[in-house]
């Protein structure tokens, strides 16, 4: 007689996957660089997660699902038929926005977010992926290692290089925009800047 295994006792599909749909979408947007394709990626990833849910042995559902999202993104990008088209407008989709009474402060904040987004878009895919997962999604080093299927040491060295590349890219964008004096000091605050931008 063949024994049919039930879903893991750690929780059902809805409890393991659905709470992480926003994180999945944010990751997909930054990897495929297109809202429409990101929605398709998340939909495909949810279907894949449902299809393979019986293989989920419990533990960290977020890392398990984000690994599926990541793999789905790279599979789509490798096909090459879904090249980025429309840029993602973080201001429009980031949720809560800071309220500024001072128009000059609002303008400076908007400039900073624009510079951060341009700097992120100019980073290599792997650096952008690491920064999004660590700084925005706040994955631990262990979770990052699980999602990206590499040792923790590789994650740590990769994050160090990614943060350094981000600072260089941000300073370059600031110089190009003529506001390098103000942004040089902020470039050192990688974590806060990325979270503020929704990265």
Image (cartoon, grey):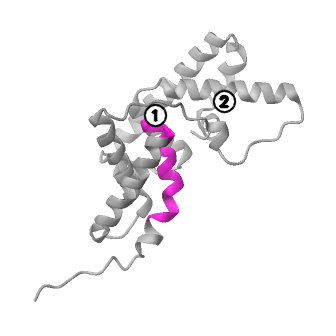
- What secondary structure prevails in the magenta region? helix
| SS assignment at label 2 | helix
Q: 102 left or right of 113?
A: right
C-alpha distance separating marks 1 and 2 = 16 Å
Q: Residue furthest bottom?
A: 1
Residue 141 located left or right of residue 148: right
Secondary structure under the numbered disc 1 in the rendered image? helix
- Considering every residue shown, the one lying at the far right of the view is 101
At label 2, counting other C-alpha atoms closer than 10 Å, the crowd grade (few under 14, some 14-19, many 20 or more) is some
> Is there any visible trace of residue 133 in the rendered image?
no
Which image quadrant is residue 155 in? top left
Magenta span contains residue 62 = no
Residues in magenta, as a range: 17-35
Q: Residue at x 77, y 25 (%)?
A: 108
Give the residue pinned by disc 1: 128
The residue carrying mark 2 is: 113
């Amino acid at each position: 007689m063949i024994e049919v295994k039930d879903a893991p006792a750690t929780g059902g599909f809805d409890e393991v996957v659905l709470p992480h749909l926003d994180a999945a979408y944010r990751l997909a947007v930054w990897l495929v660089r297109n809202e429409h394709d990101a929605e398709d990626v998340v939909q495909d990833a949810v279907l894949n997660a449902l299809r393979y849910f019986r293989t989920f042995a419990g533990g960290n559902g977020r890392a398990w699902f984000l690994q599926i999202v990541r793999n789905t993104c790279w599979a789509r990008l490798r096909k090459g038929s879904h090249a980025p088209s429309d840029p993602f407008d973080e201001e429009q989709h980031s949720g809560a926005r800071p309220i500024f009474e001072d128009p000059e402060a609002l303008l400076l904040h908007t400039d900073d977010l624009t510079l951060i987004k341009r700097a992120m878009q100019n980073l290599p895919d792997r650096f952008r992926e690491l920064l999004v997962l660590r700084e925005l999604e706040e994955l631990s080093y262990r979770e990052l290692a699980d999602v990206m299927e590499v040792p923790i040491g590789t994650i740590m060295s990769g994050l160090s290089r990614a943060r350094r590349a981000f600072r260089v890219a941000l300073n370059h964008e600031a110089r190009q925009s003529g506001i390098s004096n103000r942004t040089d000091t902020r470039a050192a605050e990688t974590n806060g800047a990325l979270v503020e931008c929704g990265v």
